[in-house]
Amino acid sequence: MPQKTIFTARRLSASTFLVNEVNDVFDENPFLYAILVPSANTLVLVDTGCDGRSRTPDPGVTRVRDFLERVPVGANGDRPLNPQGQLGYVVVLTHCHYDHILGVEQFAHDSQIVASGHDPSFVSPENLPKHSLCAPLDLPTPTYTPTLVPHSSLLSSPTGTSLNLRVLHTPGHTPDELALWHEEERMLYVGDTLYECAPIIFPSEGSIVRWFESVDDLIALVRDADSDGGLLTRINAGHQTAGEPAMDVLLASKAFMQDVVSGTEPIQRRWQKRGDTFVEYAQKGGRFSLQCPERLVLLARRSPI
């Protein structure tokens, strides 16, 4: 009988599995990614999810680490992704929002935790409760000490073996947003920078201006990677979108945001949230939508894009 769990997993590439935490109490259903690097005796985990806070009655396995180490995955030959924890972990946090970090304490005692070094004060211990949104939601803020890495850093295992993964700073959604680039497999992990079929949400600390700059950098990277006529780059987000053609998703999301800033896309609704006036835009057909403080749109309209 299959083991009960709140996680599902499917293979995206030779080394990578999408791990989806489903039916969480926040309705986030976050996408996590397990990248197996046996040559470095390492499993790279991209984000850690909601720490098993589930609506599912009798949910079974709710800790992502237990899922990785104990629950058989059909797409992995009916073996767990990391049987009995044989591989060490490197955990990459795409940004500090609660639905991406609540499970991090499962790894903090024995694993390297990687985060963006773009704005160290944003993720400092004194600011993390607010910026993670844990404090506004009355959630305990996880305790961990991240390694804040520079832009374009290559990741290594704790023993110094290359993981062939590059960290890119992509501020916009948050100041600490990062992307992870796996050139060999042409896989791009973008966190909450963009995704399809659910609102892209900017918090008060976000910047649409910086978002455009980051997306342009990612478009340039993908264009260069795809120019050799080989394997096309695929994009993997923190929600909804995984394994899709990267250039198509990047260009389409940028076009939608340009319509928002130009005023072509109308406001669907307006409301108050945490002292800000928020607005929502929704593309016809539902592929892209946006929720953000209205002042971020107004600031972008005054800036050259």
Image (cartoon, grey):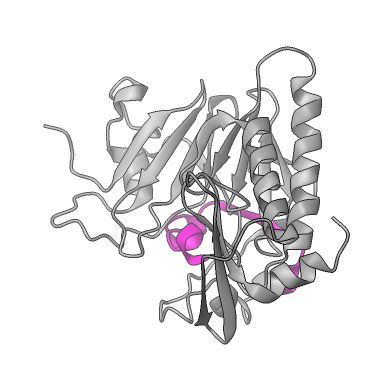
Reply yes or no: does residue 133 show up in magenta.
no
At horizontal 42% and vertical 77% (from top left) the residue drawn is 140
Please provide percent x and percent y for residue 287. 51, 44
Please provide percent x and percent y for residue 195. 55, 46
Please say if 77 is above or below 197: above
> Hey, which residue is sitting farthest bottom in the picture?
275
Q: Could you say which is closer to the camera, residue 220 or residue 68?
A: 220
Please say if 86 is above or below 98: above
Q: Could you say which is closer to the camera, residue 119 or residue 157?
A: 119
> Hey, which residue is sitting farthest right in the picture?
304
The residues colored magenta run 97-121
Please say if 229 is above or below 39: above
Reply yes or no: does residue 98 show up in magenta.
yes
At horizontal 71% and vertical 68% (from top left) the residue drawn is 297
Q: Is residue 160 visible?
A: no
Please provide percent x and percent y for residue 209. 78, 61
Q: Could you say which is closer to the camera, residue 250 or residue 40?
A: 250
Q: Is residue 141 visible?
A: yes
